[in-house]
Image (cartoon, rainbow, N blue to C red):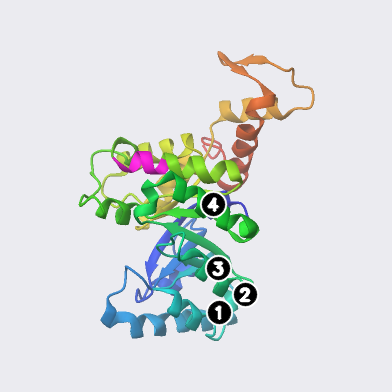
């Protein structure tokens, strides 16, 4: 599955009573969700969260959802328990929290005995260490076909610096920007998709829209969301416009010249074909901006 198909992935606490409704289309255009049993759950809420997940799994077994549903366990021990839970085969996969070069092999040993996909999350000190990121990439390489996306835990990373995201600037305008660039530059050329971190200030849609534009510029074509109102905004930015579609089709044409001009820009199929292919994929999943008007 291409990560473009994930779209905006909504994180939902497992104790949220609306989780089941969300899994069955209560949010228009939602394509993927993560049922969280980790940071979104207090220690005293774990039993209720497990019960909520168990009920959701039973529902998915009776009536499969069109959404890609992932589960985020609290730790490796919980993942082991979840894999033994009835109907767990009806979820797409697991988000692996706080992976490091030391812990990732243990996560992989447990989950790779199942058929589930994974989304490892980088959110610790190694996010600032390019050599460690390269080792993580090497560790994941043998399992690349099972990795839906590598996720960036932006809030946890910033917590290491004792700071919080500004509501007035995008992630790329602060210290998280360099981390995103390093992770994208490490994993994307190796064939992995990278998921952009959440913008927690859901009352600032204009900043979110600008941030998604920057996500796309950095090759991040799926994003964490924490509020239903963010879904439509993120997906609207993922829609290429008509000019991009014209250029993409021209670049991908078998009759395309080696170099040609379009809308005042140089188009070179030898280098621009990957971009053009992604434009087409985004259009197939999200539509074309203005096409519905």
Q: What residue is at 35 percent from the left and 73 percent from the top? A: 16
Q: Earlier in the sequence, mark 1 or mark 3?
A: 1
Q: What residue is at 45 percent from the left and 51 percent from the top? A: 132
- The residue beneath circle 4 is 137
SS under mark 2: loop
The numbered disc on residue 114 is 2
Q: How far from the left and from the top, in percent, is residue 120?
A: 48, 60
Q: What residue is at 62 percent from the left and 75 percent from the top? A: 113
Q: Earlier in the sequence, mark 4 or mark 1?
A: 1
SS under mark 3: helix
Q: Residue furthest left?
A: 162
Q: CA–CA distance between discs 1 and 2?
A: 10 Å
- The residue beneath circle 3 is 108
Q: Give the residues drawn in magenta, as a range.
A: 175-180
The numbered disc on residue 130 is none
In the image, taking residue 250 as reference, residue 164 lies left or right, namely left
Q: Earlier in the sequence, mark 3 or mark 2?
A: 3
Mark 2: few, some, or many residues within 10 Å (few <14, many ≥20)? few
The numbered disc on residue 88 is 1
| Residue 116 painted magenta | no
């Amino acid at each position: 599955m291409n990560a473009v198909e994930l779209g905006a992935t909504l994180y939902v606490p497992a104790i949220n009573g609306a989780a089941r409704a969300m899994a069955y289309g209560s949010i228009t255009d939602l394509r993927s969700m993560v049922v969280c049993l980790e940071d979104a759950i207090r220690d005293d809420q774990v039993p209720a969260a497990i019960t909520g997940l168990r009920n959701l799994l039973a529902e998915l077994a009776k009536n499969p959802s069109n959404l890609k549903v992932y589960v985020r366990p609290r730790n490796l021990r919980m993942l082991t328990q979840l894999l033994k839970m009835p109907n767990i085969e009806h979820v797409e996969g697991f988000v692996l929290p706080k992976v490091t070069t030391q812990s990732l092999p243990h996560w992989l040993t447990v989950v790779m005995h199942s058929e589930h996909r994974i989304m490892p999350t980088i959110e610790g000190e190694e996010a600032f260490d390019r050599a460690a990121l390269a080792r993580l990439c090497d560790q994941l390489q043998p399992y690349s076909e099972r990795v839906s996306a590598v996720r960036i835990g932006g809030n946890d990373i910033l917590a290491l610096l004792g700071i919080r995201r500004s509501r007035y600037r995008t992630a790329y305008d602060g210290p998280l920007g360099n981390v995103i660039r390093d992770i994208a530059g490490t994993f994307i050329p190796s064939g992995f998709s990278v998921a952009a971190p959440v913008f927690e200030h859901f009352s600032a849609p204009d900043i979110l829209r600008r941030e998604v534009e920057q996500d796309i510029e950095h090759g991040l074509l799926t994003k964490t969301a924490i509020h239903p109102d963010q879904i439509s905004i993120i997906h609207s930015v993922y829609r290429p416009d008509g000019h991009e579609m014209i250029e993409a089709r021209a670049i991908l044409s078998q009759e395309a010249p080696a170099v040609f001009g379009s809308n005042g820009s140089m188009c070179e199929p030898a280098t621009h074909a990957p971009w053009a292919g992604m434009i087409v994929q985004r259009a197939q999943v999200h539509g074309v901006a203005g096409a519905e008007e």
